[in-house]
Image (cartoon, rainbow, N blue to C red):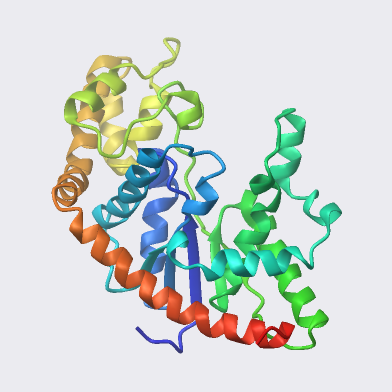
Amino acid sequence: MDENKPVLLSGVKPSGEFHIGNYFGALRQQVELFESGKYRCFIMVADYHALNTVRDAGEMRRYTYDLVMTYLAVGLDPEKVILFKQSDVPTHTELAWIFGTLTTMPYLMRAHAFKDAQEKNREINVGTFTYPLLMAADILLYDTAIVPVGQDQKQHIEIARDTAEKFNHTFRDDVFTLPEPYIVPHVAVVPGTDGRKMSKSYNNVIPLFASREEIARLVMGIVTDSTGERPENVYAIHKLVRSEDDLAALYEEHRGQYKILKEALIEDLDCYLTPLRTRYHELRRDLGIVEDILARGAEEARDTSARKMERVKKAIGVL
C-alpha cells in the first residue's frame, strides 16, 4: 500500500446489526471512497468507544465480528485498506491520556454528546465526557488528512484540529497534521417502515441481511397513507434498488394497489440484497478470515502509530 498517499481514517463503533438505512445512507458510499485509490485507508473498529453503551463481552465480540463481516460482504477489499480494532493498538489510549493533560473541562463541555447527555438528565460517565479526546487520538496518530463524517459529527474533527494545534504550540514541535472533515455527498435519508428515518431506536428497520421471509413481513407492514395514489414510504425505499424511470410505469399501472406494489418491493429488495446476504453467511462459517484480517491490520496500525508516538514522547520529554 502506497505510504505516500494522503491518509483517510474512518472509525465505526461495533454496536449492533446494520440495516438497509445504514447501507444506502452511508456504507455503500464509504466503500466506494475507500476503494477509490486516492487514499491510504485505515478502517478502525472503534470498540473502546463502543464501551460507553455495550456492556456485555459476548455482545462486543459478536458486534465486532459482524461489523467486519458486513464491510466484507458489501464489497470492501481487505487488501486495499488497513482494517483493525482500536483495542489492538494501545497507542490510542496512551495518546488520549496525554491530550487529557492539555485539555480543559470547559472546552470538553462544549461537545455535542456531552450537552445531549446533560439535556436528557442522564448520569454522564467519564468515557462520554472524554470521548472527543480518544477520537482526536484515533485521528492524529496516523497523520490523517481526511475523515469521512456526517454533518452532525463535524465538531469531532474541529476538536481534533484544536488538540493538534495546542499540542504543537505547547511543545513547540509540529508533530501533528491537521485533519479535514470529508462530508460524504449524496447521503440518503432512508425512511423506516413507519415513515420516520430508519433507526434501531424507532424499531422501524429492515436488516441488511434479512431473509426473504423477514423482508416480506417487514415490507407488508410498511405504513401507507390510504388517501394517496402512491404509497410514498414504499416508493422511497423502492427507488433505492430500482431507477425512478422503471418505477414510474410500475406505480402508474398499479396506482392505489398497495399490496401489489409492496410485493414488487419485496421481490426487488430481496434480489438486490441476496448477493450481500450470501457473502455474509459464507463469512460467518469461517470466522478465521475475520481474525486474520484484523491481525494483519493491527500489526500495520501498531507500526504506523508507534512511529508517531515516538515523536510525541520525544516532544513531551519522556523519551
Residue 181, visible in the rendered structure: no
The residue depicted at 60 percent of the width and 68 percent of the height is: 94
Q: What is the total number of numbered labels drawn onto the structure image?
A: 0
Q: From what the image shows, is residue 95 above or below residue 232?
A: below
Which residue is farthest front?
318
Location of residue 152 in the rendering, given as x and y in whole percent from the top left corner = 64, 49
Quadrant housing residue 300:
bottom left
The residue depicted at 51 percent of the width and 80 percent of the height is: 306
Which residue is farthest top?
226
In the image, 77 versus 265, the foreground residue is 77
Location of residue 215 in the rendering, given as x and y in whole percent from the top left corner = 25, 27
Location of residue 142 in the rendering, given as x and y in whole percent from the top left corner = 53, 76
Q: From what the image shows, is residue 42 above or below residue 205?
A: below
Q: From what the image shows, is residue 201 above or below residue 143?
A: above
In the image, 98 versus 21, the foreground residue is 98
On screen, residue 305 versus residue 171, left or right, reads: left
Q: Quadrant of the C terminus?
A: bottom right
On screen, residue 214 versus residue 239, left or right, reads: left
In the image, 5 versus 127, the foreground residue is 127
Q: From what the image shows, is residue 249 above or below residue 287?
A: above
Q: Quadrant of the N terminus?
A: bottom left
On screen, residue 86 versus residue 280, left or right, reads: right
Location of residue 211 in the rendering, given as x and y in whole percent from the top left corner = 19, 31
The residue depicted at 60 percent of the width and 60 percent of the height is: 135
Quadrant housing residue 220:
top left
The residue depicted at 47 percent of the width and 81 percent of the height is: 304
